[in-house]
Image: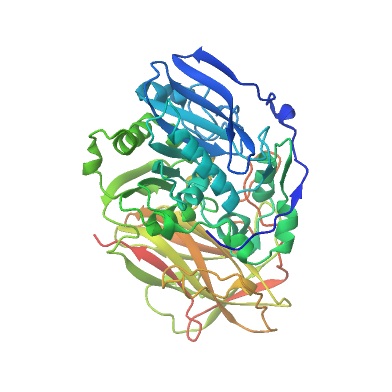
Amino acid sequence: MTATRITYRFRAPLNAPAARGAAPPVYRRTIERGMIIERDVAVVLRDGVRIFVDVYRPLDEQPAAPLVAWGPYGKHTPNEPTRFPQAGLKAEHMSPITPFEGPDPVYWVPRGYAVVTVDKRGTWYSEGAATYLSPEEAQDFYDVIEWAGVQPWSNGRVGLTGVSYLASSQWRVAELNPPHLAAINPWEGWADTYREVACHGGIPDTWFWPYLWVRWGASSTEIEDWRAEMREHPFFDEFWASKAADFSRIRTPAFVVASWSDQGLHTRGTLEGFKHIASAHKWLQVHGRKKWAYYYEPENVARLQTFFDHFLKGLPTAIDQWPKVRLEVRERCYVGAMRNENEWPLARTRYTKLHLDAHGGALRTRPVAEAGQRRYEAVCGLPEADHATFDITFEEPLELTGHMKLRVFMSAEGADDLDVFVGVQKLGVDGAVVHFPYYAQFEDGPVALGWLRASHRELDAAKSTDYQPVLAHRRLQKIEAGAVVPLDVEIWPSSTRFEAGEGLRLIVQGSEINKYPKTSAPVYFRHEDTVNRGLHIIHTGAAYDSYLLVPLIPG
């Protein structure tokens, strides 16, 4: 945790709790669905602020292992499959009292667990002012874990589980290592708010980030004012550092679940979390499906129980036979094979350069001797965008699993900056694009994505590797007129199998790779506050050895 005291901006709430279906808190205890349910239990935090939780626990009153679901969505808000009809959620996989993105009490309580759902500080009717993924919120979460660990109905071993915010908040509190915290399950949650959500590659998100603020903004007090803070903190400073996880401090046993499909939201942070946490006991599972549906699939719930039974209840389970890593190698939408591995990233990876050739728009396995240029119009409207593409057809089957990087030399006509959007696609033997599940609700997704604003191209040397460039985001470096500059674009991790005759396409353009109409699509990130104008020019060959670095897995 950062020791710097952060100054927050607050504002009136964006939603009234009553308007979002939340009744004022009144404690009540009922027997429902074969369990004891205590609603609106007041928990007093270290500074005297009261927040409210619901507790679902076994009828026999025997000590149960608490599972805490911490988030801003409202403990009264059920995870209704009809709310996001394209997400693949199945009603038979959850009960009507399942909290949004959290564990289903109807499954867990009969198996000797207590589920605690929380309205965090400043949300709904909980007291205080709401901050999000902050050090102060982590301290509140710590207090609730310690409260749950000493209740008469608790066995003293607390676990954490949940998707998205319910996962991101786990990274933050696990840094503090609360004494009663025994196991965590971050199921697809970002870890670096600036780089992974608010400002992809230095390009501000103008659609999903503001939407989240509205979704989290139900309060009877006040909430953190993101708009004001974004204006005051355009670079990665101490403010944004306070909203990024310090993985080196996390020692709690962890079952981490990530996906290749959450490009632009959770993929990067979840995998970074597994890679860097200091936990002696940690496992990773990576899939290529839709995250909400995958969390509730019975096979995955049972696997999660194996993990919690071991660390929260001390039972002998099959976890001793688990591989450290299980990942899905995708072929196409909902077709792929799970495989066991020993580590992430894979130690046997052969990082291979595919060189961009402007002549014919190809990717070559050898450096290109002849210089060339490909140009595209940088400012484009919906639904089609001007772009540059570079293709390669593979003569033999191969697998690409891991991080990709685009090193590309570019210039702009009549501009001192440029926003670059990068996509990697799979091509079938017929040349058609092969689609994958994407962003929880779509099925026309790419293999992987990357972004870069050229003025943010400076790298963080301490964090960057040959295959994963990490931007510093400390200052602007505008482009001089006519200058050709090298750009290193981080392309988020993925895993894809290609058969002989199938191919890979690299797309470079000045706007989103996938576009969805605002009126009909589920909420999705957009970058409409662009610096682009005029033509972008990609330089290849000779002195400008632009290349795509891919993670080739032998065998």
Q: Which colour scheme is used?
A: rainbow
User: Which quadrant of the figure has residue 319?
Assistant: top left
Please say if 377 is above or below 411: above
- Front residue of 44/544: it is 44
From this view, report whether residue 470 is shown above or below residue 171. Answer: below
User: Foreground: 280 or 189?
Assistant: 280
Q: Where is residue 363 in the image (x, y as percent from the top left)?
A: 44, 70
Q: Give the side of residue 529 with respect to residue 542, left or right.
A: right
What residue is rendered at 57% in x and 23% in y? 39
User: Can see residue 200?
Assistant: no
Q: Which residue is drawn at 74% across and 39% down?
A: 221
Q: Is residue 479 above or below residue 354?
A: below
Q: Quadrant of residue 504?
A: bottom left
**Which of 166/404 is in front?**
166
When the figure is inspected, residue 143 is found, relative to residue 535, above or below; the finding is: above
**Residue 385 locus on image (x, y percent):** 65, 58
Q: Quadrant of residue 386?
A: bottom right
Q: Quick check: can you spot residue 83? A: yes
Q: Where is residue 482 in the image (x, y as percent from the top left)?
A: 67, 84
- Residue plotted at (44% across, 14% down): 34
- Residue 259: x and y in percent read 43, 47
The furthest residue to the right? 12
Residue that protrudes farthest toward the bottom in the picture: 543
Quadrant housing the C terminus = bottom left
Horizontally, is 343 left or right of 228 in the view? left
- Give the total of numbered labels: 0
